[in-house]
Image: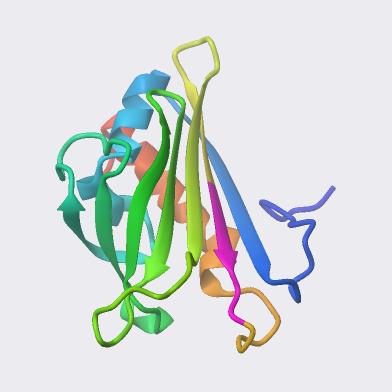
């Protein structure tokens, strides 16, 4: 048995990479979904996010279809800010955003760069399995090998923090 949190089946030299992380939260699925899909909560748990600015929608409620967020990335990753739009939403169950890089001149990259999907599964005992799947289109100029946003070991502490916030045990 592998000790890795997630072992991708797609080789590192392809044009798409992904990482999936999961955690069980001791709260009902709707509560987990609502907290995780509220834009203002993102920097509280996601290790890559240093800040957020809601461009369409409301910061302190679950984001709706068509809502837009500008996410700034922690400086050590040397990543451009991302503009995310909610493209799929099944309240209490599934939420998907697509992101495009914001270029140095403030314009958007011509193509989508990332897809993040959050899913919640009611485990039937008052707990919820929360899953985060992040897919990234890799530019042809990027060297082969995983990028920090694709490192499940780097993301999992964020899910532990998400769990602590939702369960009310965060410091």
**Residue 105 on image: x %, y %:** 25, 87
Between residue 84 and residue 93, name the one nearer to us. 84
Between residue 160 and residue 116, name the one nearer to us. 116
- Is 84 displayed left or right of 22 in the figure? left
- Is 158 displayed left or right of 64 in the figure? right
Between residue 159 and residue 48, name the one nearer to us. 48
**Residue 4 on image: x %, y %:** 71, 55
Give the quarter of the image for residue 67. top left
Q: Which residue is at a point 24% across and 80% down the rendered structure image?
A: 106
Point out the stretch of residues depicted in magenta.
133-139
Q: Main secondary structure of the magenta part?
A: strand
Give the quarter of the image for residue 34. top left
Between residue 167 and residue 18, name the one nearer to us. 18
Where 97 falls versus 148 (above or below)?
Answer: above
- Is 131 displayed left or right of 50 in the figure? right
Q: How many marks?
A: 0
- Magenta includes 137? yes
**Residue 60 on image: x %, y %:** 15, 40
Q: Which residue is most to the right? A: 1
- Is 89 displayed left or right of 72 in the figure? right
**Residue 40 on image: x %, y %:** 20, 48
Q: Which residue is most to the front? A: 110
Q: Which residue is at a point 41% across and 61% down the rendered structure image?
A: 99
Give the quarter of the image for residue 53. bottom left
Where 108 falls versus 20 (above or below)?
Answer: below
Where 121 falls versus 132 (above or below)?
Answer: above
- Magenta includes 36? no
Q: Is residue 72 visible?
A: yes
Q: Which residue is at a point 49% across and 61% down the rendered structure image?
A: 114
Where 146 falls versus 30 (above or below)?
Answer: below
């Amino acid at each position: 048995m592998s000790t890795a949190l997630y072992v991708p089946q797609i080789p590192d030299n392809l044009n798409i990479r992904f990482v999936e992380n999961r955690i069980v939260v001791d709260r009902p699925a709707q509560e987990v979904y609502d907290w995780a899909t509220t834009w203002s909560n993102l920097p509280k748990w996601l290790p890559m996010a240093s800040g957020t600015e809601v461009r369409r929608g409301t910061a302190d409620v679950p984001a709706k279809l068509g809502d837009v967020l500008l996410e700034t990335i922690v400086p050590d990753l040397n990543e451009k800010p991302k503009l995310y739009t909610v493209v799929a939403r099944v309240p209490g169950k599934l939420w998907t955003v697509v992101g495009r890089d914001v270029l140095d001149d403030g314009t958007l990259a011509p193509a989508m760069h990332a897809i993040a999907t959050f899913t919640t599964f009611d485990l039937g005992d008052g707990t919820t399995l929360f899953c985060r799947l992040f897919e990234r289109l890799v530019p042809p100029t990027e060297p082969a090998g995983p990028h920090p946003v694709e490192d499940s070991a780097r993301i999992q502490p964020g899910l532990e923090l998400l769990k602590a916030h939702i369960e009310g045990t965060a410091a």
